[in-house]
Amino acid sequence: MPPCGLYRTVLPIGTLEAGRLVYFHNHGDPGPGVYFPERWSHNRAHFSPKGMTMPEGFNVKALRSLPAEGFYRVARSFVCCEKKCVKFEPEQFLQLGYNGAGKPLLFVPEHAGGAITVPERGTPIDDAALPNLVPLQVFEGKEQQHDLSMPRGIIVH
């Protein structure tokens, strides 16, 4: 069995067609299975807690391993695709995500007003560009709660 992680199906698996982003869990209950994205938040897939167990005779070659979603830097310059629409330069800071078909997307963070923001639209890239990315270790903080309640006794005009 392959390790747990993100994959793209490249061959059908039972009734599941090729070309899907999945999370493979090799020790799920009741057994190894794939889980499907049910939504995206901040360019990251959130997977359903219910998945599909692997059928008997499952071919591990049906899954292509994908680098983890997250923040990366560019090691060597590369272009997005054969059309050369976008060029990415060494040391550039990027966020890697995927669409529902498991195709990689790069999001270019922007610095403004003392904060780094990441756009919701990314640039599709070819799989051949992935080795040019080096993962960065970024502290995962808690989701901010936007609580507008005020302490007692404070009057807001």
Image (spheres, rainbow, N blue to C red):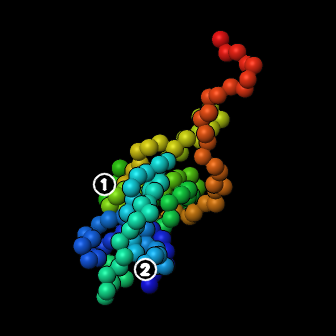
Which residue is pictured at 53% across the width and 58% down the height? 70
Report the mark closest to the observer, 1 or 2. 2
* Residue 45: image location, x then y, percent: 44, 56
* Residue 143: image location, x then y, percent: 60, 46
Which residue is pictured at 75% across the width and 19% down the height? 153
* Secondary structure type for disc 1: loop
Kindly indicate the quadrant of the structure image that contains residue 24: bottom left
Please give the count of numbered marks on the rendered protein: 2
- Residue at the disc numbered 1: 83
Q: CA distance from mark 1 to mark 2?
A: 43 Å
Q: Is residue 12 left or right of residue 24?
A: left
Residue farthest right in this picture: 153
Q: Is residue 103 left or right of residue 71?
A: left
Along the viewing direction, whichever of 133 and 17 lies nearer the viewer: 17
Mark 1 neighbour class, 10 Å CA radius: few under 14, some 14 to 19, many 20 or more: few
Which residue is pictured at 62% across the width and 33% down the height? 147
- Residue at the disc numbered 2: 31
Q: Is residue 8 visible?
A: yes
Give the quadrant of the C terminus: top right
79 above or below 42? below
At label 2, which amino acid type do we have?
A: Gly
The image's mark for residue 25 is: none
* Secondary structure type for disc 2: loop
